[in-house]
Every structure is written in structure tokens, then in C-alpha cells.
Image (cartoon, helix red, strand yellow):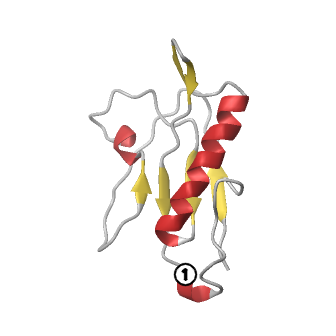
Amino acid sequence: MTGCTVVLPPAGSRGGVWVMGGGPGTRETDGMSPHSRSEGPTAVLLTGGSAFGLAAADGVARWLEERERGTWTPAGPVPLVPTAVVYDLPSGDPKARPGPDDG
């Protein structure tokens, strides 16, 4: 069994992250560093599926872009979606993992 959870923080929220472990799987977490100049996350995604689950962030970013949510740029909004995965492949069908359509 696997899945994903999206958190939509209020505009102006700041985030923080501490990445640890022997094989962490993350995406866009550098923007939550205290030294980052990013505006903060548009959404935060926690997903299963090991490294394959990172693809679910594409779906979250697409959903946010369709709603014009994200950091405003001259090219339009760019959603910031920090993502972390867990290794849960042995807990069920290893081919059942979140992807872009699930995010």
C-alpha cells in the first residue's frame, strides 16, 4: 500500500527541512533552507513509492499552475513543491506507486 499527501500552506508561509538517512529521496527541499531566498513552499508533498514517487510532484505542480498559484515570475507562476519520499516498495505491489496523475 502506498499513497501521497499534499499540504497547501497559507500564502507567505516559510518552511524548514532536515534531510537525513542513508538514502533520502527529496525534491526542491533546498528552497526550505534558512539560507534560501525563495518565497516559501506553494505546497509540500509527502509520498510513498521510493524514488519513483517523486514523479507525483509533477502532478501537484501542474495542478497549482492551472490555478495560477506559485512564485510569480515574468513567465507566470512557478509552483514550489518540496517533496520527500519513503521507501515502502516491499509493503505491497512494488509497481503500485504514486505518479504525476496521483499528485
Which quarter of the picture shows residue 67? top right
Q: Is residue 52 above or below residue 83?
A: below
> Measuring 48% from the left and 46% from the top, which residue is drawn there?
82
- Residue furthest to the top: 74
> Measuring 51% from the left and 11% from the top, which residue is drawn there?
74
- Residue furthest to the front: 95
> Measuring 45% from the left and 27% from the top, which residue is drawn there?
39
Q: Is residue 31 above or below residue 3?
A: above
Residue in front for this viewpoint, 70 or 13: 70
What secondary structure is found at the residue carrying circle 1? helix
Q: Position of residue 95 (x, y in %)?
A: 63, 78
Q: Position of residue 34 (x, y in %)?
A: 30, 38
Residue in front for this viewpoint, 29 or 60: 60
In this picture, residue 88 sits left or right of residue 99: left
Amino acid carrying mark 1 in the image: Leu
Which quarter of the picture shows residue 46? bottom right
Which quarter of the picture shows residue 77? top right
Question: Quadrant location of the N terminus?
Answer: bottom right
Residue underneath mark 1: 89
> Measuring 66% from the left and 39% from the top, which residue is drawn there?
62
Q: Is residue 58 above or below residue 94?
A: above
Q: Is residue 97 above or below residue 31?
A: below
In this picture, residue 8 sits left or right of residue 13: right
Q: Please give the count of numbered marks on the rendered protein.
A: 1
Q: Position of residue 75 (x, y in %)?
A: 54, 16
Q: Position of residue 64 (x, y in %)?
A: 66, 35
Callout 1 crowding tier (Cα within 10 Å): few <14, some 14–19, many ≥20: some
